Amino acid sequence: MGASGLGYGLANCINLSNLTLYLSWNYISAMGASGLGSGLANCINLSNLYLGLYQNQIGDEGASGLGSGLANCINLSNLTLYLSQNQIGAMGASGLGSGLANCINLSNLTLHLSQNQIGDEGASGLGSGLANCINLSNLTLYLSQNQIGAMGASGLGSGLANCINLSNLTLHLSENQIGAMGASGLGSGLANCINLSNLTLYLFSNQIGDEGASGLGSGLANCINLSNLLLYLSWNKIGDKGASGLGSGLANCINLSNQTLYLSQNQIGDEGASGLGSGLANCINLSNFTLDLCMNEIGYEGASGLGSGLANCINLSNLTLDLSQKQFICFGL
């Protein structure tokens, strides 16, 4: 019976309000996950659900079964799903998205789907589901290493564009293949999230290039209420135009207090570093700032441009700056 037996028992617990299940590393199959989903479908009064199914073997059928069950849990306010390393593909992720589309009262959602194979279709399916969750305040998505390309990232962006009440967003999309178009699509979605206060984006190793970085910058320019920003954009073939585009967007984020930018291992030169500096010059409320620009192509002029921008950040309390370059910077005397 296993997980299916648990589901059978849960089906009778119709008055449950809070449910936490830790079931990781248990060789649970598609049938077991679907059985759990069937049980959850009866728990229509659930407000808070935590389901840990990390590293099982639920696959597409199991993920879709869970989605079908969640579709009945329309009173959910807080939902956490750990489904990483479960051989879930496009069909399973889309099934989860369909279920989430019914959970219109969700305020807090954390979804772990890293190291599956959901691809563009699955990511777009999740985006379609999220588009219905207009009451979300806090959203965390772990989607690293999922073979997601430009269309999938753009689909996620389209969904996020509807989540206008988001205050806190963390998105892990590292080690996919979203490219310039995907990053720009995400930026377009973020442009609608004008109530964001805290934003964390993990996008390293995605080949977003100049166009993608500029697209993200354009989206950030609308997020004028941001207080805390963390951007992980290392290993992305970003050059001067992309860095300058990011700087232009950041120039609008005048309420930033804490900012961390990882731009190491790109192709940013003097012009790009100076462009970042120009944007940072507007961030006069910064208190804590970390900027990692190591292993780029920045020389004396770029370092000076950064310095000129930072000179305006008179409220800085803590500053960490990494300018270790592929070639030594001669600062002069």
Image (cartoon, rainbow, N blue to C red):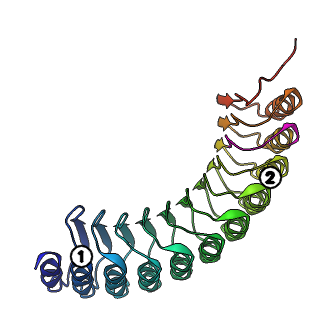
Q: Is residue 38 left or right of residue 236?
A: left
Residue at the location (32% across, 74% down)? 47
Q: Quadrant of residue 156?
A: bottom right
Residue 242 is tagged as: 2
Image quadrant where one finds the N terminus:
bottom left
Alpha-carbon distance for marks 2 and 1?
Answer: 45 Å
Q: Which residue is mark 1?
A: 29
Three-letter residue code for mark 1: Ser
Q: Nearer the viewer, residue 149 or 244?
A: 149
Q: Element under label 1?
A: loop
User: Taking 160 as reference, is 132 above or below it?
Assistant: below
Residue at the location (62% across, 77% down)? 155
Residue at the location (73% across, 30% down)? 325
Residue at the location (37% across, 70% down)? 79
- Give the overall secondary structure of the magenta segment: loop
Mark 2 burial class by Cα count in 10 Å: few <14, some 14-19, many 20+: many
**Highlighted magenta segment, given as a residue range:** 263-271
Q: Quadrant of residue 41?
A: bottom left
Q: Is residue 74 left or right of residue 177?
A: left
Q: Nearer the viewer, residue 42 or 141?
A: 141
In the rendering, at what x and y percent does residue 239 appear?
80, 48
In the rendering, at what x and y percent does residue 157 appear?
64, 72
Image quadrant where one finds the C terminus:
top right
Q: Quadrant of residue 291?
A: top right
